[in-house]
Image (cartoon, grey):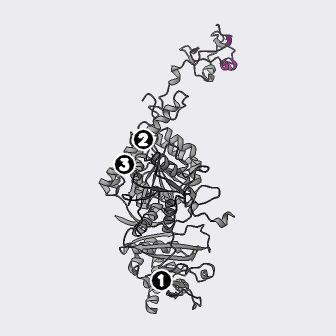
Amino acid sequence: MRELRIHGRGGQGSVTAAELIAVAAFEGGMFAQAFPAFGVERRGAPVQAFVRFDNQKIRLRSQIYEPDYIIVQDSTLIRDVNVFQGLKEGGIAIINTEKALTYPFPKGVKVITIDATSIALKTLGMPITNTTLMGAFAAASGEIKLEALEDAVRRRFKGELAEKNIAAAKEAYRFVKEAS
Amino acid sequence: MLEIMEGSHAVAESVGLCRPQVIAAYPITPQTHIVEALAEMVANCTIDAEYITVESEFSALSACLGASAAGSRVYSATTSQGLALMFEVCFNCAGMRLPVVMTIVNRALGAPLSIWNDHQDSVSLRDSGWMQLYAEDNQEATDLHYIAYRVSEDHRVLLPSFVCFDGFILSHTYEPVDMITQEQADSYVPAFKPYHRLDADDPISFGLFASPDYYMEFRYAIDQAMNQARSVLPEAGRVFSEMFGRDYSGLVEEYRLEDADCAIVAMGSICGTVKDAVDEMRNDGKKVGLLKLRAFRPFPVKEVQKALSGVSTVAVLDKNISLGSKGAVALEIRDALYGSQIPVHDYIIALGGRDVRRKDIAAVVASAEAGKGDIFYGLREEVLK
Amino acid sequence: MALGLGCTARPGKSRDNRTGSWRVFRPEFIDEKCTKCGMCSIICPEGCIGVNEEGLPVPDYDYCKGCGLCAEECPAEAIEMKKEEK
């Protein structure tokens, strides 16, 4: 079983990202489970959402404490929340930031930084980075296929909005693939 | 076909497949997604039901009571304070023997206010005459609705049902669920045949006054109906497994209990985490198993006695507390095992949404084996200072 | 079972109970004064005052509790409350 923890702020679409990643993983033939860290959802408050992937039925219901992957939707969160807590050695951290980060990252962790906000602003016209970071996650983790992600986005959003979100995800996917 | 969807939407879809004729509910977190989805299905004519918007939970269940007495298949859903507000109507539904089916999206009761999960709400209605079924995952949550309608409406039973599933932990979780088709649902849940109903051309009164000469007999009749449900529920579960392959033939489910020294007893979604913890402990050579209660009312006394007969220690996980006494499940288990000498240790756990991990289950088992029980597990001592 | 399942009952049960088995006063109807307005029949809380073909009131004393409302309301003062003979 592999586990993903998404750190974001209320309104950034972390829960939607977790759900769509689970849908894409399921469509790709895996068992998947997505759920939010149930809180009182105030806009801007730090939130978490979780995804589990496995080849068999997932029974575990606890929150995720030792993830294989983390997505950080907003680098300012690193100040407020220990986003790296429990991240496994060999794990992958995907961080949305426009500048190079100088934090003391945990050892043995692969850190991928991407300016998802600029990509989202350019393609969506809104600073909502969840679909962009999903593209980056697909490229970095290999847990989900880009095509499955596109299908999942189309199931959630309609028409032009879906296509814009897919364009954002694709751009991030290419960026991560080329950077690695 | 296996599809991935949110628990609330899966439940709403399965309820729709049961063809309710009247739905009345009042939105409350974390039940909201279910009734929103059903309201949408009614508005889009996906299901042919009357959706009655009401001003409170008391009205919601009252509307269901009236509609059920008039001969309709009815549905409601609620949680926590909403269920508390329905208290009086719950007793009336059972007393009038109306087969209402209601989803309880389990949530803690205030004060202090909490929107998170435990079982205090439904467990507090244990004496109301409603059957209570608890789901481990969203698959079971959907399937138990078909079973609940079939058993509630069975003329040998005629009692209302709670289908309980854990707020947020299941209701807001996306996971794969196998939905049956409308055709299959129709063949499993036949059209509602009321035992008797309100009809202006053939009038009848429900829920009349009973003097001391009659009241006890009415209560006895309800208890007898619960006894009937002890066999009708497994029978409906067997038919379900024959038709759809998922086995709900037991009021309880045993997991790796055959040669277990220590048995964990639990209800609801925590059972999934316990199963994983049991596997880990088994890998470490510990003989541990799980007894999952699918039905809390009627309480499966015989099944519990049989399942726990060979164990040397029992650890009960209670997501509720009967304040001034113990957890409600532990009391039942002790009663069932009375005279057996098997020690039953109670652990009040996961109240108000406190997360439970596999290591917590291992710690509970270690406590039980050390003879230390009847405690609130995982209290934060620093908060109590 | 003898008990209606769900505490149910067909209507008309109270007809079996003669609810007028006891009263201190009974209404007596003076047909000569009666204007046949029908008020007594409407006002009777037990619904036990019928009206015959001539339009005159016909009480059913099996159900009359002797409350006196009919006499109180009768605009023609055609009903008198008399002490029940023991």
In this picture, residue A140 sits left or right of residue B354 = left
The magenta region covers: C58-86
Amino acid bearing label 3: Pro
Q: Is residue B7 above or below residue A176?
A: above
Of residue B348 and residue B54, the one placed in the foreground of this image is B348
Circle 1 sits on which residue? A91
The reply to whether residue B8 is in sight is: no
Seen in the picture, residue C70 relative to A69 is either above or below; the reply is above
Output the chain of dot 3: B
Q: Is residue C73 magenta?
A: yes
Residue placed under numbered mark 2 in the picture: B227
SS state under label 2: helix
Q: Split into 4 quadrants, where in the image is the C terminus of chain B?
A: bottom right
Q: How far apart are marks 2 and 1 (CA)?
A: 54 Å
Picture coordinates of residue B144, whole percent (x, y)? 41, 54
Residue ID for mark 3: B234
Q: Earlier in the sequence, mark 2 or mark 3?
A: 2
